């Protein structure tokens, strides 16, 4: 320990000539000045996004929290009363939330894997056989351009109990609580297919030909090559789609409203549908509490996806 | 074994004939370079050997086996791509192992795979990098991984498509030597595609010169350089390129031909006898021209110095002679010439090539 010089000896040893001392000091001041102006610039550059986030994300979140901790009478003229966390607790442990959670979860399970797989299948066949044939790509991706409302009405016509083409398909019936949720999910799968298709196709087209050729020469058969080389190479796009589809599933509203209006007997009421509450059966405070639940759920699911998949997703070099 | 035979092999893409009736036999263990300008069809020829392009006509064999209809994975070849085509999501070790593990039907046991990966990594100095991903390597290291992935399977034939073009000049020179060394060590057939004549000259046992889908000449580097088969080969190989001057045969006898050009008269060693007055193109490499000692003989090419390039060890003197550009080389210690000076240049008869202007073929 004795061989460690004290600060004072080091200072004298390090600066045998007297004028050396003020120089580092001046440098330090200048560096501090630069750091200050650097961070000022950084904050300035951040300002626009801070404003946008503040107005559209942080403030609403704060209001959400405020509503969730206040009891709002359904009659607007009564003042809100602060109730602490009791309203949140009651709502999030109640059957309403559990039902919504179940329906949202099922909606996710029905739409995400099926949507991804169908999108990949379509994109792969378009990429391989129809390379360059733009019209097929246009047909496949046309659902991107059509609105949810239009697509839902088309679907509604298809499953219409009197005249629909699929009127006799029992597992597509909108009259039965279990099949109704599946039918609505299918319609969502179909509506998202265009997006999935386009994203996967674009990703496939960025996979270098030489990579696939190298894999062919190495001896991979077509199927193993797809799973061992192509899928890992396009995995960032697949992760992106998985997250987007989950978010879509958790936020699905229009198709439910148009196809079933939440029925039959609440069988297609997802969390978001309950929050939107078109028939107005819940108080503002309850809906705010449900929203908090949905917020946490979305964050957890997206976080988990990142966590699980980031180990297996490869982001180029 | 690993000989590759092209017999009238043709490749068409629609109306484009990329490879036109190739006939050449690449011997087992040979380092063969396919050399030609961009778009001449050299990659296509290589990709046909690999099985990545179908053969449109003719017969292609590897060893004694006709491979026209053999799938790429069953051909026992390895290829190094220009972009290296490493799998970005796999470690270096997995990349190298890939050809041994990919085909589940013919997969080696894991222990043997590990030994062979270690061996290949050792040969290419990659042992310390086995755990990294390709994205964490320099260009030169990636190139080595691509080579290791090729040698690990011990193929009958190595195919390489411009494997050095993504390296900087210094690394390229070094890797050139290492490739030659690797070839010597492995003793396997190498088929190497490049548009760089220096790579071809320094590495090849033999060169196939290609232009517009056709083979122009096949031969050892020195032979191709010293007696180019036609005007294309003559001008494509050599830097600065061969000087070309048109002229007419003025005398032909006893193994030598005298040609009169607008710039003067030159003599060429030529065993064939050419008819007097025939049009020819005279080709003389810059190193076969020298300043004439005697200006009175009436022989030689009269030229005017227009530019001088100093290269350190030598000079390139660029002259104009009766409308054509003529370049000649001078050692650095030779008496300097001045810009604008009128000079007479003597050509070595053995280094004076004659070509037919219409067929472009060599005459002597
Ligand atoms: N898949 C293809 N479809 C149509 N034409 C092709 C295809 N591949 C190559 N060609 C054509 O065949 C000819 C030869 O191409 P090739 O790739 O063999 O050239 P190259 O000699 O390797 O050139 P470079 O040095 O630029 O790589 C070119 O005219 C090219 O346009
Ligand atoms: Mg090429």
Image (spheres, coloured by chain):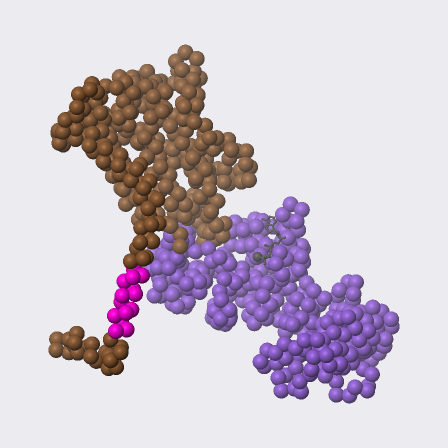
Chain colours: A brown, B purple
Where residue A115 appears, x then y in whole percent? 38, 33
Q: Is residue A267 above or below residue B33?
A: above
Residue drawn 64% across the image and 64% down it: B209
Quarter of the figure with residue B236: bottom right
Residue drawn 54% across the image and 59% down it: B161
Q: In this view, does A276 lie above or below B344?
A: above
The image shows a total of numbered marks equal to 0
Where residue B342 appears, x then y in whole percent? 75, 81
Q: Is residue B55 above or below residue A185?
A: below
Q: Main secondary structure of the magenta part?
A: helix
Q: Is residue A157 above or below residue B160?
A: above
Quarter of the figure with residue B283: bottom right
Q: In which quarter of the image is the N terminus of chain A?
A: bottom left
Where residue B235 appears, x then y in whole percent? 68, 68
Q: Nearer the viewer, residue B334 or A51?
A: A51
Q: Give the range drawn in magenta.
A: A22-35
Residue drawn 19% across the image and 30% down it: A68
A99 left or right, relative to B330: left
Q: Which of B271 and B196 is in front in this view?
A: B196
B300 left or right, relative to A17: right
Residue A121 seen anywhere in this rendered image of the structure:
no
B192 left or right, relative to A279: right
Residue A33, magenta (yes or no)? yes
Where residue A13 appears, x then y in whole percent? 21, 80
């Amino acid at each position: 320990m004795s061989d460690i010089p004290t600060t004072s000896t080091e200072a004298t040893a390090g600066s045998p000539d007297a004028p050396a001392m003020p120089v580092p000091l001046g440098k330090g001041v200048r560096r501090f000045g630069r750091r200050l102006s650097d961070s000022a610039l950084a904050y300035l550059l951040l300002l626009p996004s801070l404003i946008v986030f503040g107005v559209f994300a942080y403030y609403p979140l704060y209001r959400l929290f405020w509503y969730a901790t206040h009891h709002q009478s359904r009659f607007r003229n009564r003042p809100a009363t602060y109730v602490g966390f009791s309203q949140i607790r009651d709502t999030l442990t109640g059957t309403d939330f559990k039902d919504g959670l179940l329906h949202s979860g099922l909606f996710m399970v029905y739409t995400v894997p099926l949507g991804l797989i169908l999108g990949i299948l379509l994109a792969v066949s378009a990429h391989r056989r129809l390379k360059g044939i733009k019209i097929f790509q246009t047909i496949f991706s046309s659902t991107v351009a059509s609105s949810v409302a239009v697509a839902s009405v088309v679907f509604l016509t298809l499953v219409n109990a009197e005249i629909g083409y699929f009127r006799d398909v029992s597992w597509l019936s909108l009259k039965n609580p279990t099949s109704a949720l599946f039918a609505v999910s299918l319609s969502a799968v179909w509506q998202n297919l265009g997006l999935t298709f386009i994203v996967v196709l674009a990703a496939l087209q960025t996979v270098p030909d030489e990579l696939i050729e190298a894999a062919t020469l190495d001896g991979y058969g077509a199927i193993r090559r797809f799973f061992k080389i192509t899928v890992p190479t396009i995995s960032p796009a697949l992760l992106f789609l998985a997250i987007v589809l989950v978010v879509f599933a958790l936020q699905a509203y229009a198709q439910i409203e148009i196809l079933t209006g939440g029925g039959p007997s609440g069988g297609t009421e997802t969390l978001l549908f309950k929050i939107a509450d078109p028939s107005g059966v819940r108080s503002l405070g309850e809906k705010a509490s449900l929203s908090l639940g949905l917020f946490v759920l979305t964050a957890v699911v997206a976080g988990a996806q990142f966590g699980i998949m980031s180990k297996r997703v490869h982001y180029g070099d | 074994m690993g000989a590759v035979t092209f017999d009238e092999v043709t490749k068409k893409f629609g109306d484009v004939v990329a490879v036109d009736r190739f006939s050449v036999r690449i011997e087992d263990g040979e380092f063969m370079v396919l050399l030609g300008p961009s778009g001449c069809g050299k990659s296509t020829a290589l990709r046909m050997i690999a099985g990545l392009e179908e053969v449109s006509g003719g017969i292609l064999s590897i060893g004694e086996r006709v491979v026209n209809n053999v799938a790429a994975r069953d051909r026992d070849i390895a290829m190094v791509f220009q972009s290296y085509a490493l799998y970005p999501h796999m470690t270096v070790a997995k990349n190298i192992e890939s050809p041994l593990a990919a085909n589940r039907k013919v997969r080696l046991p894991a222990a043997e795979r590990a030994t062979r990966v270690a061996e290949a990594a050792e040969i290419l100095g990659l042992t310390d990098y086995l755990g990294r991903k390709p994205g964490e390597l320099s260009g030169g290291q990636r190139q080595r991984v691509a080579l290791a992935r090729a040698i690990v399977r011990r193929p009958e034939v190595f195919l390489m498509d411009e494997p050095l073009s993504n390296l900087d000049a210094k690394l390229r020179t070094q890797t050139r030597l290492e490739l030659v060394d690797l070839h010597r060590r492995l003793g396997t057939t190498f088929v190497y595609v490049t548009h760089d004549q220096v790579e071809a000259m320094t590495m090849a046992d033999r060169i196939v010169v290609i232009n517009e889908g056709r083979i122009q000449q096949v031969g050892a580097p020195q032979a191709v350089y010293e007696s180019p088969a036609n005007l294309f080969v003559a001008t494509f190989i050599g830097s600065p390129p061969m000087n070309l001057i048109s002229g007419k045969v003025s005398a032909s006898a006893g193994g030598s031909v005298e040609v009169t050009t607008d710039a003067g008269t030159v003599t060429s060693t030529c065993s064939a006898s050419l008819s007097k007055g025939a049009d020819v193109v005279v080709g003389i490499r810059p190193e076969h021209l020298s300043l004439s000692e005697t200006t009175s003989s009436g022989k030689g090419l009269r030229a005017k110095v227009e530019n001088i390039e100093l290269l350190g060890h030598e000079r390139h003197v660029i002259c104009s002679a009766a409308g054509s550009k003529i370049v000649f080389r001078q050692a650095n210690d030779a008496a300097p010439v001045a810009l604008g000076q009128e000079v007479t240049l003597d050509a070595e008869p053995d280094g004076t090539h004659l070509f037919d202007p219409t067929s472009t073929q060599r005459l002597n």
